[in-house]
Amino acid sequence: SAPATRRPATGDEPFLRVEIGFTPAWYAKALDVDFGERWHTDPAYRKSTILAMKEMLAKRFPGIPVGDNGADDGLDLLTGTFGANTISAIYGVDIRYDNRGWPTSEHQFLDDEQVDALQPPNLDDNEFFQALLRQLEWIEQDQGRVEGYINWQGVLNNAQRLRGQQLFMDLIMAPERARHLFECVFSTMHDAAKRLHERQRQSGVDVRFFTVSNCLVNMLSSELYHDFLLPFDQRFAEAFSCIGVHNCAWNADPYLDSYATIPNLGYIDMGMDSDLEKARRLFPNARRAIMVTPMDVANKPLAVIKKDIEVIAEHSGPCDIVAADIDPATPDQKVIGFYELCRDISAAYEYQ
C-alpha cells in the first residue's frame, strides 16, 4: 500500500539495484509500532516511529541500503500515509485502520444511480484532502521541506474501491457507466497529485513523476485494458513529465504492447514470469524492475533464488530487483543473503 520509492536514475546505478521493503507487521513485531489511525493522521507520531525504524534497520542490516527513503535532505514523513486509500477517502469512503498493517477501504460501494450521478469532489472543500494538506504544513515546519509520496494508485484500483466487484460487470454490461466512473477518478487523481506536487515545490522538493498502480490489471483482458484504461494512463503520462507503471508481481505479458504506447515512461515493474527480453526491447529507456514475491524470498533456498536472479540479470538487466512486503517470519539472515547474492551477480556483470 505504500508506494515503492521510485528514486530517479542518475546513470551510475549498479547493474542490479536492489529494493527491499517490509510489511508494517514486521516493524510492529520488531518495535511494537502501532500503525493505526494515529500513525496516518499525526505526523509527529509518525516521525517518532520512522526514526525508530530507521535506527533499528541500521543495526540489523548494517551496510545494506534497506529502508533508505532516497531523500537528499529532510526526512520522508509522507510516504505510506493513508496507504492506498487516499482517493477513495476523498470520495467519502471510510478507512479501516489496522494496528499491525496497512489500512483498507470499507466496502461502501456505489450503486448504479450513485455512479451515474457521480462528480469529482471539490478539493478546496474536501475535508479529507484539506486535512492531508495540513499535515504538509506541519512537515515543512518540522523538516524545512516536504519529501515523500502519496500512493495515488491507478484508475482501476480506485474505481474498484468505489464500485466493488460490480465494476467488472459494468465493463461488459454498462461500459458507459464504467467510463464515467473512470473519468471521475482520473480527474481527482490528476488534480490532487498536481496540488500536492505544487505544495512540495513550494517547500523545495520538485517531484516530476507520477506512478500508476495497476494491481488489478490481471483481472482484465488485454483488450479491456487497451480500450478502457490505457487512455487514462496515457493522459497521466502527458500531464506529468515522467510516469511509472506498477504491476505487482503479475505476468505483464498481455499488457506490454499497450504499455509501449505510453509516452514518457520512466519506470515499469512486473513479475519474473513475464517475457523479460521483450520488455527490455520495448522499454529500452525505462528503468525496469522485476518483483520477487515475499513468498519466494522466504521459502526458496538461496541457491534457487540465485538461479532466478541470474535469469533476471541475463534477460532483463540492467534493472531493479524489488523484494517488497517481507513479513516477520522471514529471518534477517535470509534477507541479508538475498541482498548479497544480488550484489555479487550485479558486480559480475559490471566487471565484464
Image: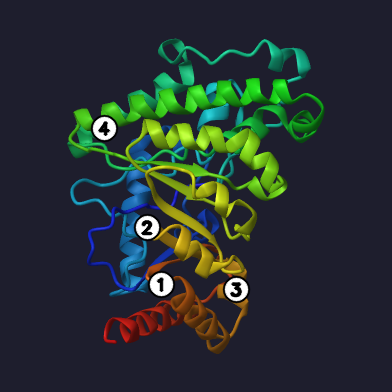
First in sequence, mark 2 or 3: give its number.
2
The amino acid on which the numbered mark 4 sits, given as a three-letter code, is Gln
User: Would you say 269 lies left or right of 249 here?
Assistant: left
Q: Tell me the mark number nearer the camera, choosing from 4 and 2.
A: 4
Under tag 4, what secondary structure? helix
Q: Which residue is mark 1?
A: 317
First in sequence, mark 2 or 1: give its number.
2
Disc 2 + disc 1, Cβ < 8 Å: no
The amino acid on which the numbered mark 1 sits, given as a three-letter code, is Gly
Residue 42's image quarter? top left
The amino acid on which the numbered mark 2 sits, given as a three-letter code, is Met
Residue 168's image quarter? top right
Q: Which residue is mark 2?
A: 53
Q: Which mark is residue 296?
A: 3
Q: Tell me the mark number nearer the camera, choosing from 3 and 1.
A: 1
Image position of 23 with respect to 232: above or below: below
Q: Which residue is mark 4?
A: 200
